[in-house]
Image (tube, rainbow, N blue to C red):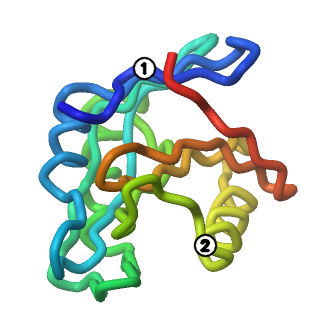
């Protein structure tokens, strides 16, 4: 797999791991040729110093997928998140969002940054939102806080 599984903040204070299943979803949705953008939510467990992302939902028929736009509608994604929350006694939870870009090394657009800020601000648990963009050769991974502060993660 081309995408790195382990990430951290530069000071090592937060560690992040993408499971093989999540990395497989990323790989299968790399945006090459004329494929539209894809995306979904990231679910997993929160630990003292880190996050383990175990599930990445994939586009539903209700989502809007264009070459340079992915609009995730909540219905199918929310059902998966609720089911996992209940079946794990609340340990598997919503961690963030992912989507693709048709770039080798992806960078967030102004629309991405604003949407991530809104989602982070709306989080009931007040934790930062994990935001991931899947590019053709690498990932963009960051934590976005409700106040708009961004923290880029790097491969560990």
Q: Say if 13 sits above or below 68 in the image.
A: above
Q: Left of 134 or right of it: where is 129?
A: right
Tag count: 2
The image quarter containing residue 121 is bottom right
Residue 72 in the image: state x and y as whole percent: 38, 75
The image quarter containing residue 138 is top left
Q: Say if 154 sits above or below 58 in the image.
A: above
Q: Say if 109 sits above or below 24 in the image.
A: below
Most foreground residue, 127 or 131: 131
Q: Which of pointers 2 and 1 lies earlier in the amino acid sequence?
A: 1
| Real-space Cα separation, disc 2 to disc 1, in angstroms | 24 Å
What residue is rendered at 33% in x and 61% in y? 40
Most foreground residue, 113 or 140: 140
Circle 2 is placed at which residue position?
A: 109
Q: Say if 114 sits above or below 89 in the image.
A: below
Q: Which mark is residue 6?
A: 1
Residue 62 in the image: state x and y as whole percent: 23, 85
Most foreground residue, 110 or 19: 110
What residue is rendered at 54% in x and 15% in y? 47
The image quarter containing residue 23 is top left
What residue is rendered at 39% in x and 64% in y? 103
At mark 2, the secondary structure is loop
């Amino acid at each position: 797999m081309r995408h790195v599984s382990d990430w951290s903040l530069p000071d090592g204070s937060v560690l992040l791991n993408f499971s093989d299943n999540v990395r497989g979803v990323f790989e299968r949705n790399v945006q090459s040729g004329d494929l539209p953008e894809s995306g979904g939510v990231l679910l997993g467990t929160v630990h003292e110093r880190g996050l383990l992302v175990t599930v990445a939902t994939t586009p539903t028929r209700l989502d809007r997928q264009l070459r340079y736009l992915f609009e995730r509608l909540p219905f199918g994604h929310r059902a998966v998140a609720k089911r996992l929350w209940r079946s794990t006694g609340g340990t598997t939870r919503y961690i963030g969002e992912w989507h693709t870009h048709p770039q080798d090394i992806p960078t967030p657009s102004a629309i991405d940054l604003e949407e991530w800020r809104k989602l982070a601000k709306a989080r009931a648990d007040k934790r930062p939102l994990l935001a991931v963009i899947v590019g053709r050769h690498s990932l963009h991974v960051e934590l976005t806080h409700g106040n708009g502060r961004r923290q880029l993660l790097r491969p560990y």
